[in-house]
Image: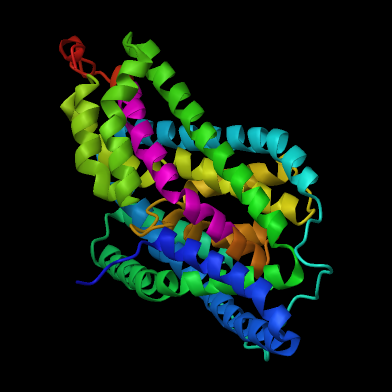
């Protein structure tokens, strides 16, 4: 019987092995330790180059058809639902920024320049350099995706949408069969190098603080969403959260908003929102509402910047948060889809290098299922809000209060 190990467990195993070998090998042979670390630095250089190469294709392949498909729907309901989802996502990002910049500096500052071993060593470099130039820049890819996405929606193009859907399928295959399987090895190399240089203690300390903080922020965000929805519908927000709990725990297991849609839809109907609204908004929100993922991305990126003694400025972060709400549209139905869609922005807008991106991915993946669970659970609250402001008289039924 073949045992399948989940991605999060593979990443944790990779981190554990990297730390163990990074501590053990220098004591056995400093020369072999340096050669072994350079070998993985070379792998990381190749993998990081390929990841940078594929980013523009990810942006075009996901965002263009995602925007085009948003053009299909029932007019005003579509527009209103989209505004509500985007507003929730942006609010989550701003909320996470102020929480993270308030909480994390104290913890990360106390970690300081902690290292393992008597003295820090220089980071290993690759044996050679291999340039993989992307076909276009990140901002160019975004513009291309917007132009074609909006254009396809405007002319209701079916043939061109089919092409972009196939591009989407190809990029998803690359992510599923190349990037995801190799990701633990990439993270292994990053942590091996950090252990070799003596920086891993600092990183792990930050990981634990960020992890706990993000879970708390997720719960606060859900409380805010359901307090608003409950106030509008005159229902107990905690009773509504209890109704949506099955969707939360299903998403924890599947790590996919799309795979959780049937459960989210069933539970959202029990909150009292009409079938007309829930049947339309829940599948839509599974694609465009990512408040939990945004909290995770913003918090993790701030943690990585602080770890590297880089400044965190709100006026620089605000455009990043606004762009996140767009780039994560139609993020792939694979674990970590949102962070792959955001990789380009991390580099161009926040100045992340390859090692920082790898740390970001590792931090994000540890939180991915919780972010997804927050996304889909919040979808129920947003569906209630949309229902409250639609003209459908059955939008919020009082007959379901007993659920």
Q: Which residues are magenta?
A: 360-386
Question: Which residue is depicted at the point 43% across and 33% down?
Answer: 83
Relative height, residue 327 to residue 15 (above, below) = above
Q: Quadrant of residue 355?
A: bottom right
x%, y% of residue 138?
57, 65
Q: Quadrant of residue 237?
A: top left
Quarter of the image that includes the N terminus = bottom left
Quarter of the image that includes the C terminus = top left
x%, y% of residue 359?
61, 61
x%, y% of residue 114?
78, 56
Whether residue 380 is in magenta: the answer is yes
Q: Is residue 281 visible?
A: no
Relative height, residue 298 to residue 122 (above, below) = above
54 and 241: which is toward the camera: 241
Q: Is residue 317 left or right of residue 66?
A: right
**Number of numbered discs present?**
0
- Which color scheme did the rendering employ for the protein? rainbow
Q: Is residue 58 left or right of residue 204?
A: left
Relative height, residue 378 to residue 301 (above, below) = above
Q: Quadrant of residue 40?
A: bottom right
Q: Taken as a whole, is the magenta stretch helix, strand or loop?
A: helix
Whether residue 345 is in magenta: the answer is no
Q: Is residue 207 left or right of residue 68?
A: right
Question: Which residue is depicted at the point 18% across and 29% down?
Answer: 276
x%, y% of residue 401?
21, 12
């Amino acid at each position: 019987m073949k045992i399948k190990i989940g991605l999060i467990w593979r990443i944790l195993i990779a981190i554990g092995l990297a730390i163990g070998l990074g501590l053990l090998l220098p004591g056995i042979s400093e020369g072999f330790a340096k050669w072994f670390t350079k070998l993985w630095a070379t792998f990381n250089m190749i993998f990081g180059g390929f990841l940078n190469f594929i980013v523009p294709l990810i942006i075009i392949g996901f965002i263009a058809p995602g925007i085009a498909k948003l053009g299909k729907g029932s007019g005003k309901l579509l527009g209103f639902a989209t505004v509500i989802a985007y507003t929730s996502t942006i609010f989550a990002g701003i909320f996470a920024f102020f929480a993270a910049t308030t909480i994390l500096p104290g913890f990360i500052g106390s970690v300081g320049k902690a290292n393992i071993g008597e003295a820090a060593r220089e980071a290993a470099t690759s044996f050679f350099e291999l340039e993989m130039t992307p076909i276009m820049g990140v901002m160019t890819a975004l513009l291309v995706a917007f132009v074609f996405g909006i254009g396809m929606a405007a002319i209701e193009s079916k043939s061109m949408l089919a092409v972009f859907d196939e591009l989407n399928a190809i990029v998803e295959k690359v992510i599923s069969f190349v990037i995801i399987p190799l990701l633990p090895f990439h993270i292994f190399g990053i942590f091996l190098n950090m252990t070799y240089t003596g920086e891993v203690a600092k990183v792990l300390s930050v990981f634990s603080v960020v992890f706990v903080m993000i879970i708390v922020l997720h719960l606060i965000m859900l409380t805010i969403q359901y307090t608003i929805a409950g106030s509008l519908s005159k229902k107990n927000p905690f009773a509504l959260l209890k109704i949506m709990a099955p969707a939360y725990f299903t998403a924890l297991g599947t790590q996919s908003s799309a795979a959780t849609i049937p459960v989210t839809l069933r539970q959202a109907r029990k909150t009292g929102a009409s079938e007309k609204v829930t049947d339309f908004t829940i599948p839509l929100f599974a694609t465009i509402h990512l408040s939990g993922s945004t909290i995770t991305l913003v918090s993790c990126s701030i943690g990585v910047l602080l770890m590297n003694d880089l400044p965190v400025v709100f006026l620089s972060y605000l455009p990043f948060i606004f762009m996140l709400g767009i780039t994560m549209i139609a993020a792939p139905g694979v674990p970590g889809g949102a962070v792959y869609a955001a990789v380009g922005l991390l580099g161009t807008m926040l100045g992340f290098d390859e090692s920082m991106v790898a740390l970001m991915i590792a931090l994000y993946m540890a939180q991915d299922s919780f972010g997804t669970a927050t996304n889909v659970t919040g979808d129920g609250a947003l569906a209630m809000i949309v229902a409250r402001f639609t003209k459908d008289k059955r939008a919020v039924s009082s007959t379901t209060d007993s659920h």
